[in-house]
Amino acid sequence: MDLFEDSGAPAATGNAPALTVSEISGAVKRVIEGEFGRVRVRGEVGRVSRPSSGHLYFDLKDDNACIASVCWKAQAGRLSHRPEEGMEIVVTGRLTTFPGQSKYQLLVEDVEPAGLGALMAMLETRRRALAAEGLFDPARKRPIPYLPGVIAVVTSPSGAVIRDILHRLRDRFPSRVLIWPVAVQGAACAPQVADAITRLNALAPGGPVPRPDLIIVARGGGSVEDLWGFNDEAVIRAVAAGTIPLISAVGHETDTTLIDHAADLRAPTPTAAAEMAVPVRADLAGRLADTQGRLIRAVQGRLDRPAQRLSDLGRGLGRPQALTGAARQRLDLIGARLDPALRGFLRDRRRGVEGLGIPRASLRSFMRARREAFDRAALGLTKAQDRDRDRRRAALPVLNARWLARAAGDARRALDAAGRGLDPAARRGAARQAERLNGLAARLVGARTRTLADAQRTTAQGRAALEGLTRRLAAQGPRLTADRAEALAALDRLRQTLGHMETLRRGFAIVRGPHGLVTSVATAAAAPRLDLEFHDGRLPVGPLGDGDGGDAQPAPVPRQAAPRVRAGRKAADPAPQAMPATAQTTAQPPAAVPQDGAGPAAATPRPRARRPRGAPGNGGPPDQGSLF
């Protein structure tokens, strides 16, 4: 006999059926999915994997455990926040199993940061990483064009931001605006904004869609979660890769996003972005007019200065008459003596020649030779005068007449060109003013028409509302009056029902003494006279002994005895069914006594009538008014 079982012998299976691996895995999966159909798990993101399939795999862990998490491609594109390693998040999803590796995992449907602190920590980590790549470097920022021809605005087409930007651009400098509609919050915000910036930078000049000279990315204020799409890494890289200058106008002045660091210029508000994009047209017109006036004054000065210089130099030359006056005077003096001297000289020579006997022909030849000698001397004198004049002119300051003429001609031509340009400029200015006045007149007429239409519409609506109210008043007035009358009658009936007169009609009476209501037997016995009030009148009564003329006060009635009273106005009713005055009690404030149906009558006095339980003098709590 073996003391131990043979390990090789088959074990008894009993009635339990054998399950396959797939069956037991399916059973486990159904149990887990049934118990944890939808859960929210908080933890730190561990390893993150994004394969080419588009699915998202990451670990969610804490100090003691780790759960594998999966987000399918369709759901990953709709996540409001992408999980990043080291980020603390709250995951919403459902638990399931993966039979292929015999493990359970979390199918993620939504991811949100675990509080604002975690969100800001992730934002700071992303900012440092992008700054380390040089995407926020001021050296790579492009200058904003002074007067852009086409401005692209990336924003929501239905918000107030686009209306503010268009209104501000129209007031300052009307420009061509290209609106690219995008979602400005939610999961679709970041992909649409990044795609819009990329496509705008890809536009070719001269194409069907004009290439913008400036891009404005704008959105109104909001919370950190609302503005989170503008902190996305795809948006920042699209801005950094673009070639068109970009102005960021996301949120208010206190809101800061990563696109503000990557943009070429940050505007505190969308309206301020429009002001930074274009100058004021009126200021440009004023500067142009001022520049034109300065140009005209410069041309006029260019013409006036050479003429003034020539005039100054001419005054420095002196008068020609002053230079030749003395010589002319000496010539006149010498000329007056020269004629007589020549005649005397000729006369003396003629006598000498006649005395010598020289032939006349020889004399004529000699005279001809002398005349020719004088002519040559005169010609030499003229040339000497010309040389002397040239020498004197060379000694004076040199003035280039050709240069002066050329400068005067250039200045005259510039002045003529400026004059010709002034008239078209004036005509263009007048045309612009006329066009502006016509536009204002058309806007005024349109505004007047709209105002009149609005006033007529408002008046018609008010008249219709008044007529409706009048009809309602006419229809509801009688009904409301009847309702109020019915309510008033009901209140009056309630008053009569709750009043003490109805109590008196049910057979009770109010007992009054000289000092007010009588609420006890001792007070009634001490009173010289009592007054009983019934529903149809009052009856004065008095204690026994008043009719006998006794002056002594009646002795106090014993506790169990009822006071003896007699009729004050008519004889006592001998009806034996009249109840004693203290035989009934009520919770009403005034004290009352029963009465018969024949009218007011005195109750038949019965000594030692037993009071009901709770009546005054019987050990019960006293009522506000005793029943007599």
Image: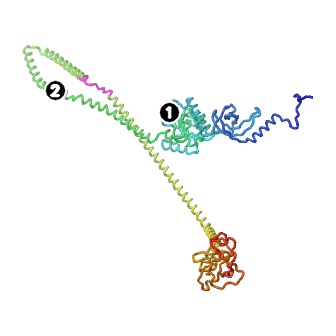
Q: Which image quadrant is residue 57 in? A: top right
Looking at the picture, which amino acid does disc 2 mark? Ala
Residue 405 drawn above or below residue 568:
above
Q: Is residue 398 magenta?
A: yes
Residue topped by disc 1: 143
Q: x, y percentage for residue 299?
A: 36, 34
Left or right, residue 603 beside residue 25: left
Q: Is residue 317 visible?
A: yes
SS at badge 2: helix
Residue topped by disc 2: 326
Q: x, y percentage for residue 71?
A: 69, 36
Residue found farthest to the right: 1
Residue 332 drawn above or below residue 613:
above
Q: x, y percentage for residue 393?
A: 25, 24
Q: Is residue 502 visible?
A: no
The stretch of residues the image draws in magenta is 392-403
